[in-house]
Amino acid sequence: MALIKLSSVKKIYQDGEIAVKALRGVNLEVAEGEFATVYGPSGSGKTTLLNLVGALDKPTSGRVQINGSSIGELNKNELAILRRNNIGFIFQSYNLIPVLTAYENVEFALKIADGKKVSKNKEKAIRILEDVGLGDMLSRRPNELSGGQKQRVAIARALVKEPRLVLADEPTANLDSETSKEVLELMLRMNQELKTTFIFSTHDPMVMDYASRLLEIRDGSISREERR
Ligand SMILES: Nc1ncnc2c1ncn2[C@@H]1O[C@H](COP(=O)(O)OP(=O)(O)OP(=O)(O)O)[C@@H](O)[C@H]1O
């Protein structure tokens, strides 16, 4: 069974009088363990696609299945549980909690996922922050970190739960090439060792080099696909 399955998915945003057709009938299956990137021009529908795959939004028509569940049939609470148990998100806007330190932001994500193993959580949170190169910034708050460092806290927070699926919107947009490489290597290791599935939206050729599957999206449709 595919981890993600989209069947004839359309998404129309109503912008006042105007209906914006953001996705125009997308069919897509992503299996467990894929490392896929979605690329295409600005406004082509990449973020819309990731939001649907992440159960953050529902399609206007068609079906989005995550691990066999049709998201159109789940209520808000069920969608939240599905996301919490399966998906790590890395967004452009970071969504870090401003009053918490880098370490606390990462540890908090673990606490929500699994309230029990507190001592293990501490080790895990520190280790993943070291892995993204922030071992000496554990006690900094978001406003004391650069854009790229915040991005790396957001990456650590998404990965620390070891979710089945990681969704990332331009994960390397604010990182220099050395840091991008380290973060991508970390994700690739998780992909190989834990079979974590990754789906990225990106313009970055380095990210595309790591991908095992490239999906081009144009005007709300998948226009080209390549497996490597
Ligand atoms: N909430 C919304 N209301 C109305 N229109 C929207 C909304 N969100 C997105 N759109 C429109 O839907 C289309 C697809 O947007 P989307 O954000 O998915 O594109 P994208 O490929 O991620 O673009 P970018 O690379 O610039 O982030 C665009 O025309 C956009 O203006």
Image (tube, rainbow, N blue to C red):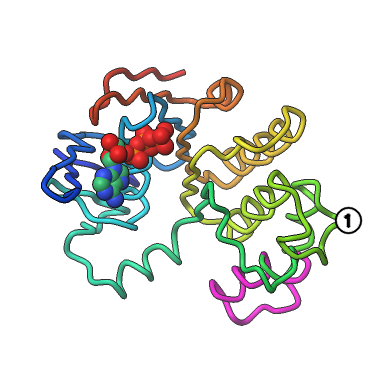
Q: Main secondary structure of the magenta part?
A: helix
Image quadrant in which the N terminus is located: top left
Task: Estimate the x, y position of residue 102 in percent, counting from the top left.
Answer: 74, 63
Side of 128 where 49 appears, left or right? left
Image height check: is 182 above or below 13?
above
Query: Where's residue 110, x and y in %?
Result: 61, 69
Residue 215 % position (x, y): 37, 25
Q: Quadrant of ligand 1?
A: top left
Residue nearest the viewer, comparing 96 with 207:
96
> Which residue is at 18% across, 59% downward?
72
Q: Residue, x 33% and y 48% (percent of image)?
A: 53
Q: Quadrant of residue 218?
A: top left
The reply to whether the magenta stretch includes residue 118 is yes
The crowd level at tag 1 (other Cα within 10 Å; few <14, some 14-19, many 20+) is few
Q: Is residue 59 left or right of residue 200?
A: left
Q: What span is in magenta?
A: 106-124
Where 227 falls versus 169 (above or below)?
Answer: above
Instruction: Farthest residue to the right: give it.
Output: 136
Residue reaching furthest bottom? 116
Report the residue at 62% width, 40% height from top.
187
Q: What residue would you read off at disc 1? A: 136
Res 84 quadrant in image: bottom left
